[in-house]
Image (cartoon, grey):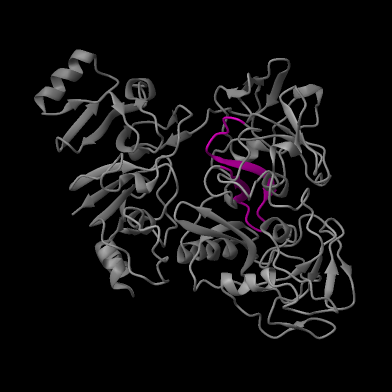
């Protein structure tokens, strides 16, 4: 899941909502208790909710009027000043925390993803929570978007506005509290833990890893969503393991911590998006996942993308309508994980290691966004699939070259004749080209930490050279976000105002599209001009638009940057 810029986020949503149309409910929603006074009670949490958003009026039958929009500070006034608002005879209304707000998301509905009977007139919009997270010099605000139902955090801007729905009742620190302390988990001693408040039993390691001496060793498998739905196991003597729903999966988030995941309970968790069993309503190509390593968001992705799996069983969140089987073209039974005492068997088609990429025929511009080097001979030694691998040596302004079909001496002779250098490894933060003659499943080693955009600042670990740089990052950023990350930030300075032009840290940024044989292009100078200056230039030159195509920089993607 990623934190997207404001406009970029809505562009993606517009596309998904277009695919959704008027989708029906996939499974029965909870039944709220109508209190007859413009409020409803959620029987699963005991919380009492206003049926209307702030700014709307309850007329006895429905919500009328237009919902107001509020900044983070304005919305929090209700949370920090009890008695500020009186409604239905009560004055203890407050802003819900992020986990409370997530409990009224209805993933069986869309546009808006909420029970429209209990909460009539809800706009498919961003709703603010009372939860904020300080990180580095900035603050991130948690919110839920009720068009689809995703939750994420956004960098705090004083002028950003949200809609607000208030709640009352004692927040349960166990079930809907924002924290997930280690003390709330019980170690079962067999590679599993039970989360006491929810009753859910979880496998401590991702499918494919082995628990030993409080570490998950080995490589976690990555699977398409259809494959992940087929996951089964006998770990701990139980045979009812299944893929968790999205709500179950995000129940693991610790919103009081940074990062938002209890790594002590679930050690060595792959820095990838974990699949849930929940499909996106009305969009046959998308399913929900949880991002545990970056921003703790609940978001959705293409079902064909590879992702790891963490299995669950039992618990109060269990929904019998969730099935653990799905159609598949083939299945293979293999032993994929063990603990020190128990063998775990999973039925998964086409098991593949973590961070696997399927490279299409032709030129692929890739990147090593993880803080560990790649051995070129080990990763690209398949001469039947790979012809050549190239890396730009920025210090020497020349190419490094490798071909799996050549002997070491032939490589050296050819490189010398062309003024190249023999390529032996791809370092952290470097991009590279691979020419493929048949579809190649590229397997990358797991482990390490993601290379961040700000690591390319001047005087930092991967500082850019003047001129052309072929680089990579491990977290998802838009080109503008990457350009902004290169700015040296004063921790005492206020955050930039909305619409502030980007700083000119780079001249241009380029990424390659294999399928179209075209370049994606971004220029902060043109972006700073505002209006359609950037899009007009892109269209006039026949380039691809990052923003229009929902194309971001991230794990596995290499890109060129020209630094002035």
Residue range in magenta is: 267-292
Q: In the shown orientation, is residue 14 left or right of residue 334? A: left
Q: Is residue 19 above or below residue 466?
A: below
- Is 435 in front, or is 445? 445
The residue at the point 76 percent across, 51 percent down is 173
Q: Position of residue 406 (x, y in %)?
A: 24, 18
Residue 182 falls within the magenta-colored stretch: no
Give the answer, above or below, for where 1 lies relative to 43.
above
Front-most of 363 and 426? 426
State left or right for residue 501 relative to residue 188.
Answer: left
- Tell me the quadrant of the picture where the C terminus can be found: bottom left
Q: Is residue 399 left or right of residue 359?
A: left
**Image height of 188 relative to 131, above or below:** above
Whether residue 465 can be seen here: yes
- The residue at 66%/83% (across/down) is 66
> Is residue 145 in view from this perspective?
no
* Residue sitting nearer the eye, 172 or 541: 172
Q: Residue at x 69, y 68 (%)?
A: 79
Q: Position of residue 170 (x, y in %)?
A: 81, 60
Determine whether 379 is above or below 194 in the image. above
| Rendered image quadrant of residue 236 | top right
């Amino acid at each position: 899941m990623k934190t997207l810029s404001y406009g970029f986020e809505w562009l993606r949503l517009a596309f998904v909502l277009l695919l959704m149309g008027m989708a029906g409910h996939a499974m029965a929603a909870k039944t709220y208790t109508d209190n007859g006074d413009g409020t409803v009670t959620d029987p699963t949490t005991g919380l009492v909710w206003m049926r209307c958003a702030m700014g709307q009026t309850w007329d006895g039958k429905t919500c009328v009027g237009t919902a107001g929009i509020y900044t983070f500070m304005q919305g929090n006034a209700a949370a920090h000043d009890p008695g500020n608002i009186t409604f239905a005879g009560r004055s203890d209304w407050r802003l819900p925390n992020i986990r409370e707000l997530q409990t009224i998301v209805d993933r069986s509905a869309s546009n808006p993803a909420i029970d429209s009977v209990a909460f009539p007139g809800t706009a498919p919009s961003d709703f603010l929570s009372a939860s904020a997270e300080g990180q580095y010099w900035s603050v991130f605000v948690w919110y839920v978007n009720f068009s689809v139902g995703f939750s994420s955090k956004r960098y705090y801007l004083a002028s950003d506005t949200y809609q607000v729905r208030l709640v009352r009742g004692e927040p349960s620190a166990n079930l809907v509290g924002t924290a997930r302390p280690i003390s709330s988990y019980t170690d079962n001693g067999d590679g599993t833990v039970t989360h006491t408040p929810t009753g859910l039993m979880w496998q401590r390691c991702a499918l494919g890893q082995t628990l030993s001496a409080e570490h998950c060793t080995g490589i976690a498998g990555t699977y398409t969503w259809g494959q992940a739905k087929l996951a089964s196991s006998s770990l701990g003597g139980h045979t009812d393991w299944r893929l968790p729903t999205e709500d179950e999966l995000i129940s693991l988030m610790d919103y009081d911590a940074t990062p938002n995941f209890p790594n002590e309970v679930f050690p060595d968790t792959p820095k990838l998006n974990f699949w849930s069993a929940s499909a996106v309503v009305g969009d046959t190509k998308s399913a929900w996942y949880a991002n545990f390593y970056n921003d703790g968001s609940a978001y959705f992705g293409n079902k064909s993308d590879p992702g790891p799996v963490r299995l669950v069983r039992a618990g109060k969140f269990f929904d019998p309508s969730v099935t653990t089987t799905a159609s598949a073209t083939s299945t293979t039974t293999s032993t994929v994980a063990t603990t020190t005492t128990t063998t775990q068997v999973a039925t998964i088609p086409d098991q593949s290691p973590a961070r696997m990429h399927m490279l299409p025929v032709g030129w692929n511009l890739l990147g090593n966004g993880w803080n560990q080097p790649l051995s070129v001979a080990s990763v690209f030694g398949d001469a039947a699939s790979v012809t050549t691998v190239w890396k730009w040596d920025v210090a020497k302004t020349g190419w490094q070259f490798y071909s799996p079909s050549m002997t070491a001496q032939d490589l050296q002779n050819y490189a010398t004749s062309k003024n190249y250098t023999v390529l032996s490894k791809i370092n952290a933060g470097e991009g590279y080209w691979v020419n493929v003659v048949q579809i190649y499943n590229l397997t990358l080693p797991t482990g390490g930490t993601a290379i961040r955009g700000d690591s390319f600042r001047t005087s930092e670990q991967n500082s850019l050279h003047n001129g052309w740089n072929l680089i990579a990052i491990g977290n998802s950023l838009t080109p503008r976000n990457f350009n902004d990350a290169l700015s040296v930030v004063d921790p005492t300075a206020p955050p930039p105002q909305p619409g502030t032009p980007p700083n000119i840290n780079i001249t241009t940024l380029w990424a390659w599209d294999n399928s179209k044989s075209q370049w994606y292009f971004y220029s902060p100078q043109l972006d700073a001009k505002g209006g359609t200056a950037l899009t007009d230039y892109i269209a006039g030159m026949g380039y691809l638009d990052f923003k229009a195509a929902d194309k971001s920089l991230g794990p596995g993607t290499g890109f060129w940057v020209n630094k002035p």
